[in-house]
């Protein structure tokens, strides 16, 4: 398996496209090897789930507010039904402070809509240090393609 030993072809295609869709074998191991190869090449990595991502650009790059879940009976006089808005810091700002490139690895990417995938692709084109790998499901062997090829653009 020379492909998994070096990871050079994957890294070259990731640098060229910026945003990749990947299908990995269900028994695991391939994605860990690729992440290790990317770290050895000087990339910083962050792994998060795509579930509950919401607006990808706002969640990853901007200060945004969230409301806590409703916990049943609450005082109606003070934000009873809605809850107070809590400010959440962007997920990637502190990782993009240096000059090192960053790889964001999104698990369970099959739940993302076409619009969210396009937003992630546009985010990579605007921020050249950011590369995104989206796991789109399982496969018998390791496969990847640029997200634009997956979307047909």
Image (cartoon, rainbow, N blue to C red):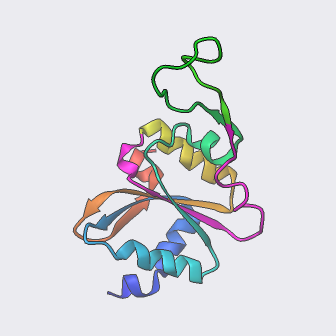
Q: Is residue 135 above or below residue 153?
A: below
On screen, residue 116 above or below 4: above
Looking at the picture, tell me which residue is in the foreground, 51 or 43: 51
Q: Is residue 13 magenta?
A: no
Question: Which residue appears farthest toward the left when viewing the image?
Answer: 140
Identified at 49% across, 40% down, the residue is 116
Instruction: Name the outermost residue toward the right.
Output: 98
State which quarter of the image contains the N terminus. bottom left
Q: Is residue 142 left or right of residue 93?
A: left
Nearest to the observer: residue 51 or residue 82: 82
Residue 105: say if magenta. Answer: yes
Residue 52 in the image: above or below residue 30: above
Q: Is residue 140 left or right of residue 21?
A: left
The answer to which quarter of the image holds residue 102 is bottom right
- What residue is shown at x 40% (from left), y 51% (from top)? 109
Q: Position of residue 88 (x, y in %)?
A: 67, 42
Q: Relative to 119, is 10 on the left or the right?
A: left
Which residue is outermost to the top? 77
Q: Nearer the viewer, residue 34 or 75?
A: 75
Number of callouts? 0
Q: Which residues are magenta?
A: 87-112
- State the residue at coordinates (68%, 59%): 128
- Residue 10 position within the rendered picture, expressed as x and y whole percent measured from the top left: 47, 73
* Residue 4 horizontal/vertical position (percent): 38, 82
Residue 118 image offset from top left, x and y in percent: 51, 42
């Amino acid at each position: 398996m020379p492909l998994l030993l070096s990871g050079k072809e994957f890294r070259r295609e990731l640098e060229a496209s910026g945003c990749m869709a990947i299908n990995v074998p269900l028994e695991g191991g391939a994605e860990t090897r690729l992440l290790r190869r990317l770290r050895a090449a000087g990339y910083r990595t962050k792994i998060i789930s795509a579930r509950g991502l919401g607006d990808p650009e706002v969640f990853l790059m901007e200060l945004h507010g969230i409301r806590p879940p409703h916990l049943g009976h609450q005082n109606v006089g003070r934000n009873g039904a809605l809850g107070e808005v809590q400010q959440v810091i962007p997920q990637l700002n502190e990782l993009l402070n240096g000059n090192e490139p960053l790889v964001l690895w999104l698990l369970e990417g099959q739940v993302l809509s076409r619009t969210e995938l396009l937003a992630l692709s546009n985010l990579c084109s605007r921020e050249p240090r950011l590369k995104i790998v989206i796991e789109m499901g399982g496969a018998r062997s390791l496969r990847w393609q640029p997200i634009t090829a997956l979307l047909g653009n």
